[in-house]
Amino acid sequence: MVQRAGAAGFTADSVTLEELSLTGTVGASVGVNSFDFVPDGDFFVMNGLGQITASTNVETEFEDMPAGLGSLQPNISIVEVRGVLVFLGGNGVLVTKRVRLLGP
């Protein structure tokens, strides 16, 4: 149950985050536990998020990626990512459950 507590915010008994699946291109930066991700389509660009950070953890599944994130080529690789999109300090972060390499 969500109750409106006034203009300053709200309270909730629980929050459920839905996973989403996106396809796009790996951006310029690929790190040890994250990479820049540029989703296909106009939705993110039109909402001021041309690129988001895809964050991985020990539970992230890597498909067709024998070297994990080392399999990704910046600004070239095409991937499908699945996870939960959250906003930290106004920046989009996709906490990944799965990353699948689709191309180069």
Image: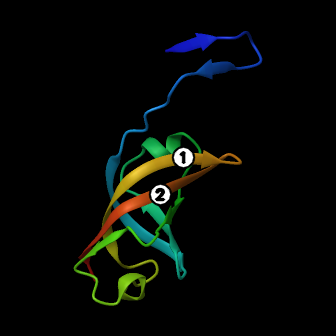
Viewer-proximal residue among 3 and 22: 3
Is 47 placed above or below 80 here?
A: above
Q: In the figure, residue 104 lies in which quadrant?
A: bottom left
Q: Residue furthest front?
A: 13
Helix, strand or loop for disc 1: strand
| Crowding near the residue tagged with mark 2, few <14, some 14–19, many ≥20 C-alpha atoms within 10 Å | many
Q: Is residue 87 left or right of residue 77?
A: right
Task: Please say which color scheme the image uses.
Answer: rainbow
Residue under the point 59% across and 11% down: 3
N-term mark: 1 or 2? 1
Is 15 placed above or below 7 here?
A: below
> How far across and how far down the image is residue 32, in percent?
53, 82
> How far across and how far down the image is residue 39, in percent?
41, 56
**On residue 15, which mark appears?**
none
User: How many numbered tags mark residues here?
Assistant: 2
**On residue 95, which mark appears?**
2
Residue under the point 48% across and 46% down: 44
Is 39 placed above or below 63 here?
A: above
| Amino acid type indicated by mark 2 | Val
Q: Is residue 16 left or right of residue 80?
A: right
> How far across and how far down the image is residue 17, in percent?
43, 38
| Amino acid type indicated by mark 1 | Val
| Crowding near the residue tagged with mark 1, few <14, some 14–19, many ≥20 C-alpha atoms within 10 Å | few
Helix, strand or loop for disc 2: strand
Residue labelled with disc 1: 86
> How far across and how far down the image is residue 64, in percent?
22, 80
Q: Residue furthest right?
A: 8
Say whether marks 1 and 2 touch (CB < 8 Å).
yes
